[in-house]
Amino acid sequence: MSNRNFYLVLAVAVVLFALAPVLVAWAPYEATMGLVQKIFYFHVPAAMMMFVSAFVCGIGSALFLFKRSARADRLALAAAELVAVFGVVVLISGPLWARKAWGVWWVWDPRLTSTLVLWMIFLAYLLLRRYGGAGSEKLSAGVALFGMANVPFVYISVDFWRSQHPTTNVVMTLVPGMRGPFWWCVAAFVLLYVLVLTLRTRLEDQRAALEDLYLKLED
Amino acid sequence: MTDFFRIAWLVMRKDLTIEVRSREILYTTLFFAMSCVLVFAFSFVKEGRALDDAAAGILWIAIAFSGTLALGRTFERERHAETLRALMMAPADRPAIYLGKLMGVLVLMAVVELIVVPLVGVMFQAPLLAHPFQLLALLATGTLGFAAVGTLFAAMLGRARSRDVLLPVLLYPITVPVIIAGVRGTAALFQAEVDEPMVRTWVAMLVFFDAVFVTLALWTFEPVMTE
Amino acid sequence: MDFTRLTLSDVSRNFGRRRALARVSFDCDAGEIVGLLGPNGAGKSTLLGILATLVAPSSGEVRYGEHTAREAGAELRRRIGLLAHDLHLYPELTAGENLEFFGRLYGVRDARARVAGWLERAGLGDRRDDPVSGFSRGMRQRLALERALLHDPRLVLLDEPFTGLDDGATFALVERLRGLKAKGCLVLLATHDLETVEGLVDRVAVLREGRLVEMAGGGGSLRERFRAVTR
């Protein structure tokens, strides 16, 4: 992303996030949940970004392994870190809602469990990169590829196992008053994701460039 | 293509020759699997009787934990004189080496299961012989899925630091579907009224899992193993 | 496939910020023995790993005749023999089993029948059924050498082949290498044993901190000339 585009996106994101609380506040109260339902405007977009990020990481890793693109590896690393970050958001905001809605902090339902598993796979990816020593970027790329392929299996298996979470239909059947603020928030999160991913990849690019300079200096 | 399977077979036979001679991995893994059964029995047995589904859970925990041990040890052997690198020099497509190591691990895990499964059956009154083929199908597909992922990870961790901890760290989250399918499928088989469609569903899912992950492992082995 | 020329152009390999090899270029032809010299950690083993197709260069290219490691794959590996520092032998297996296994791995015809001959050449004719774990370093070294050469490779890569060998075995190895040269092999030999390879190697390549340094030809012993560039 060029610098101009970056600031443009940044500006739009700032506006979206600044207005989001207002819109969320204006949105109608959900009949049974009341105020606590508003977590939904924050929780669902974060979860969406988490899953998107897992796929970005998997695809980046595949490009790194099979096309030997070092840039794709740096993108994969940035995406993996974002899976971890958005995962924290999802895994904290979810139980807050669950405590009110279901009376417990945690239930072993498909979506919670598969989110947790996915989050752990990418933490494992980061652990391998951090502690695996030289050459671990290739190994972790393999892990990311397996992690991505694993998403549907985890989801289906946990789904068979048990189910309690509100289904995806919730999003499609939102009352009109909620729909606007919801997609507004999704847009804000997408932009936030793109911005942070760009920044983080850029940092990694600079670091690689710096390494190159060190090597050149030796030559 | 014939070279491919010839070399895979050769590698497996070599692994088994070494194992038959020392029986180190077999005995330690087997003992470890039995320890798992014992330790988990304390949390799932109440007033002398096992909780519902405890047998299935304990069985698969024992398989997964002891399988990790066997995987780690198998590849530790290849690290000793860097023989894995010697295998990588073999004049065949490199996935042949993966397949050979996978088959060796599978034989080892099968022997362990041959003892642990009856043991669990006896200790938890599980009706093993009521539907032997369905049980066999669950064990075979589940073990294959676990070992397919595990063999690739253990092979590639051969040149990583702190590989002993990293293997379980990477392996368990990725094999969650195997564990769920194995436990739920086996539980459906062990309950008073056998839920046959349920067992079939889980076996079908495991077959899919195996197909996807064996393919993926064969496909990524070469790029991951080139340093 | 076969090849008679090995060409390295600008081969580099970094491990993080550490540069194990920096833009190494040279070539050699069939019938040549090239000595690879250099202090510890100069990048000799990394270079041999790259030539053996086990390690991918970070940049640059190695050509085996017309081919590269990526496209030639298995067929290329059939033509390479590597004696690595770690010897690549299974300690749990006997000497005979090790050779038979690797013979079959390389698809050598009648591998089982030829084991006796290979063992004889390693001077281990009477140790066929003894596990390698009980062997001394010198015995392992001799066995590992046979293991590396049993499929008649075109490119022979040897990492410190003289380690642990007694005088007789050293002499036998030198003769063996002359034989390989006569047969048209390309031999690359990393060693510290300068006196032994004096007069054996056709050329030397000196590595220092991952870089290839020129070594003056002509006067003085190999060791004197080596000292002059590594000081």
Image: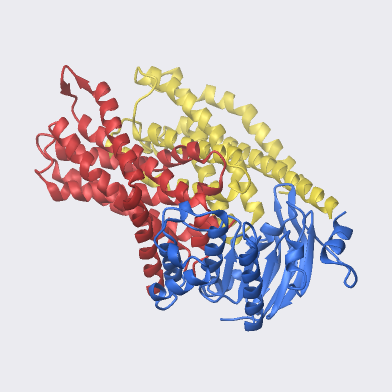
Chain colours: A yellow, B red, C blue
- Residue drawn where x is 53% and y is 41% of the image: A125
**Compared with residue B84, is residue A191 higher up or lower down, i.e. above or below?**
above
**Compared with residue A216, is residue C24 higher up or lower down, i.e. above or below?**
below
- Residue drawn where x is 88% and y is 54% of the image: C231
- Between residues B152 and C221, which one lies in front from this camera angle? C221
- Between residues A91 and A216, which one lies in front from this camera angle? A216
| One can see residue B139 in this view | yes
Q: Position of residue B35 (x, y in %)?
A: 29, 30
Quadrant of residue A168 within the rendered picture: top left
Looking at the rendered structure, the number of numbered marks drawn on it comes to 0
- Between residues B46 and C184, which one lies in front from this camera angle? C184
Quarter of the rendering occupied by the C terminus of chain B: bottom right
Quadrant of residue C194 within the rendered picture: bottom right
- Residue drawn where x is 19% and y is 45% of the image: B199
| One can see residue A28 in this view | no
- Residue drawn where x is 30% and y is 36% of the image: B31
Using residue B35 as the reference point, say whether residue C187 is left or right of it. right
Quarter of the rendering occupied by the N terminus of chain B: bottom left
Q: Position of residue B144 (x, y in %)?
A: 32, 51
Q: Position of residue A131 (x, y in %)?
A: 59, 38
Quadrant of residue C145 within the rendered picture: bottom right
Using residue C84 as the reference point, say whether residue C224 is left or right of it. right
Q: Position of residue C50 (x, y in %)?
A: 65, 63
